Image: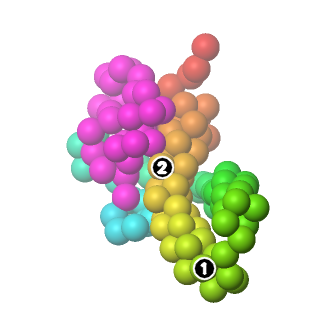
């Protein structure tokens, strides 16, 4: 099967469902963040995938801005003791990081596939 056999898959579908960027059916991850070597549905070789630090940097920028804004608002409105901030923002930061890393990594892989950074991707007009 080649890229021509599959219609383009929405980046939103790839991100939210963490599916193969070519067929949109096969799972992209095995485990939390490890990319499968090959799509079980269409056979796309994903070993060349290299998302690098892009997803982590995006998570730091987005989540960092949200957490700092939230902490400043909570401090300005309620003025809680420091331990409340620690108890409140530590799980938000850790949970948000885990929840955002998978979809952002999936989107970056899909963009690489669309622009032929992974072998055999379709040409985008």
Name the secondary structure under disc 1: helix
Picture residue at 54% right of the left edge, 31% below the top: 114
User: Would you place residue 57 above or below residue 8 in this image?
Assistant: below
Q: Quadrant of residue 71?
A: bottom right
**Residue nearest the viewer, comparing 56 with 85:** 85
**Element carrying mark 2:** helix
Q: Is residue 38 magenta?
A: no
Can you say which quadrant of the picture contains the N terminus?
Answer: top left
Quarter of the figure that contains the C terminus? top right
Q: Work out whether 100 lies above or below 115.
A: below
Q: Is residue 69 above or below residue 93?
A: above
- The tag on residue 25 is none
Q: Position of residue 51 (x, y in %)?
A: 60, 55
Q: Quadrant of residue 13?
A: top left
Color theme of the render: rainbow
| Prevailing secondary structure class for the magenta stretch in the rendered image | loop
Which of the numbered marks, if any, corresponds to residue 103? 2
Task: Identify which residue is drawn at 61% across, 31% down.
Answer: 115
Question: Which residue is at the front of the view, 97 or 50?
Answer: 97
Crowding around mark 1 (Cα neighbors within 10 Å: few <14, some 14 to 19, many 20+) is: few
Q: Position of residue 63 (x, y in %)?
A: 64, 57
Along the line of sight, the residue nearer the viewer: 13 or 78: 78
Marks 2,1: beta carbons within 8 A:
no
Residue 18: give x, y in percent of width and height.
Answer: 38, 47
**15 relative position to 26: left or right:** right
Look at the image and give the residue range highlighted in magenta. Answer: 1-29
Camera-near label (2 vs 1) is 1
Q: Residue furthest left?
A: 41
**Residue at the (46%, 59%) spot, across then down:** 99
């Amino acid at each position: 099967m080649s890229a021509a056999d599959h219609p383009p898959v929405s980046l939103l579908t790839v991100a939210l469902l963490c599916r193969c960027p070519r067929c949109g059916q096969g799972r992209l991850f095995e485990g939390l963040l490890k990319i499968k070597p090959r799509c079980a549905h269409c056979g796309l070789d994903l070993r060349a995938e290299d998302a690098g630090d892009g997803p982590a940097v995006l998570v730091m920028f987005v989540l960092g801005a949200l957490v700092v804004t939230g902490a400043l608002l909570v401090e300005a409105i309620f003025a809680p003791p420091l331990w409340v901030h620690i108890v409140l923002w530590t799980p938000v930061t850790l949970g948000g990081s885990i929840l955002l890393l998978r979809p952002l990594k999936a989107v970056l892989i899909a963009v690489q596939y669309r622009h032929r950074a992974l072998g055999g991707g379709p040409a985008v007009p």
